[in-house]
Image (cartoon, rainbow, N blue to C red):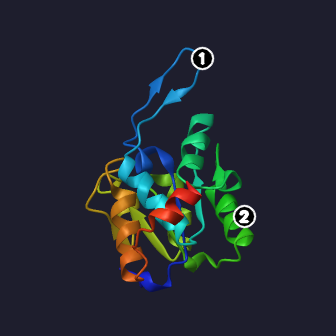
Amino acid sequence: MKDLLKIKAFAFDIDGVATDGGVFCFSDGDLLRTYDAKDGFAIRMAVMHGYPVAVITGGSSESIRKRMITSGVPAEDVFLHCRDKREQFAQFCERHHLQPEDVMYFGDDVPDKDVMIACGCGVCPSDAVEEVKEIADWISSRPGGKGCLRECIETTLRAQGKWTFDPVLYKKKF
């Protein structure tokens, strides 16, 4: 596994990483996804400790943006309807003055491969496609939507001595 002490930011896909990949489709075309609340808390902990966080997804539902904003991800770092995720990854890095190797990126399928190769630590859930597992620096013990983000963000923050909870700051930020 790559050096977790060098990670300064996190970015991830939604379907298959922050969710289990299942969707319910409504007649208006919106898709309903379920998220693990523990993953959401890990995102908040990262944000609370000053880590930039981005979502880079092919999904296009506004519900994704709303969920991620409530988890602390700034609206400008929620990239929807991505078809070449390298472009949005580069924008995120530029906006936050990061080098690609400063970022841990979570992906589960073929469209994530290029970013996983470019980033500092490419992570995938245990149920990612084989093509992604072959290039991942870290395969989480958890499947997508079931604590993959929590496991890896918490492990990284703990390695850096930053997995600490301040209820006053938490209340102020969220």
* Left or right of 114 in this view: 140: left
Which residue appears at 54% of the width and 42% of the height? 67
Report the residue marked by disc 1: 28
Looking at the rendered image, the quarter that the N terminus falls into is bottom left
- Asked if the residues shown at circle 2 and circle 1 are in contact, with their CB atoms under 8 angstroms apart, the answer is no
Which residue appears at 60% of the width and 40% of the height? 66
Examine the rendering and report whether any part of residue 126 can be seen: yes
Q: Which residue lies furthest to the front in this view?
A: 168
Q: Mark 2: which amino acid?
A: Gln
Q: Mark 1: which amino acid?
A: Asp
Residue 169 in percent (x, y) is at 53, 65
Which residue appears at 41% of the width and 37% of the height? 34
Examine the rendering and report whether any part of residue 108 can be seen: no
Q: Earlier in the sequence, mark 2 or mark 1?
A: 1
Figure check: 153 above or below 110: below
Res 3 → quadrant = bottom left
Residue 129 in percent (x, y) is at 36, 52
Where residue 96 is drawn, which disc sits there? Answer: none
* Left or right of 103 in this view: 150: left
Question: Of helix, strand and loop, which one carries label 1?
Answer: loop
Report the residue marked by disc 2: 91
Q: Residue furthest top?
A: 27
